Amino acid sequence: MDIKQLRYFTAIVEEGSLSAAAARIGIAQPSLSQHVKGLEERLGVELLVRSPRGVTVTDAGQTLLQHAQEILAAVERAQEEVRQSGNEPYGKVSFGLPSSVSMVLSVPLAETTRLELPKVSLCAVEAMSGFIRDWLQEGSIDLGILYDINMLRHFQSRLLMTEELYFFSAADAWPLASAPGDPVPMAEAARQDLVLPSGNHGLRALIDRFAKANGIELNVVVEMDALTQIKTLVARGSAHTILAPASVHDFLESGALLGAPLVEPAIRRPVYLVRNPEKVITRASREVEALTLVVIRDLVERGIWKATLAEETDAP
């Protein structure tokens, strides 16, 4: 067997037909069929079952596919490491960011990347955590930030920080007897008219879990999964909300919103930097990961991102 045969075989299985694989690879279908036939003769087993509807892989073919994917990934990693060793990092790095993180991180990270890594093209993609998790699984992005990694046991993850959630209201519609900035019991915040993400959103699931555990009923009058619209609705005085301070930093700076930390209980969530080790780890992505840590530390230390850094959390 050689690398070419493994690439051809993998393409056929992934495309599900010889014709589609031939078009993808850029060779004639009869030539591709001969490569597969030669591979089967050499191994002495049938790898694919042909039919008018395409091809299906046999048990032996499935075993070969697993090894082929590992071998091809190893070859790609080796090529990437050799190509980039000793050279200035270059290439595209795709980074999945939840909306609340993108709000505070995407711009300073993009600016820092352009300054420090001029040959690296950063593609920051804002999406819900579920999409980011799927993209990491598929290998379509290099890095992602997630709050929940319980379903990603084989991924590489780094705890960055821990955030606390706050109660937010329009500056001219503060509904509480306590002053903005003073801790607010969650039960009191929950009685206010709230706009929150829908139930399939990770933030809403977290809030619901804390509320249920403490026998608190949330007064949710509007459900909305778009962060910008939630902030706009609250700034207009139409409702109140519970969010991480980083996600409303722009509205806090302008004075449109005021906030207060939640207590009894406080709601905290971890923030992780995640990558799929099965995807080729380029030098460019490693450099962007390192810059991300620098930028996040700066944002936290300047009070722009209200959070406790991981090493501070772990300190005795």
Image: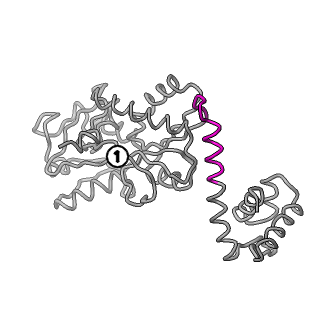
The residue shown at (24%, 39%) is: 312
Q: Position of residue 218 (x, y in %)?
A: 23, 55
Per the rendered image, the range of residues in magenta is 73-91
Q: Position of residue 263 (x, y in %)?
A: 15, 47
Of all residues shown, which one is farthest toward the left? 177
Camera-side residue: 174 or 15?
A: 15
Please give the residue where the numbered disc 1 appears in the rendered image: 159
Disc 1 secondary structure class: strand
Camera-side residue: 82 or 288?
A: 82
| Left or right, residue 78 beside residue 54 | left
Tell whether position 286 is magenta. Answer: no
Q: Position of residue 14 (x, y in %)?
A: 69, 62
The residue shown at (88%, 61%) is: 31
For residue 98, what is the image quadrant?
Answer: top left
Render colour scheme: one colour
Establish if 230 lies above or below 59.
Answer: above
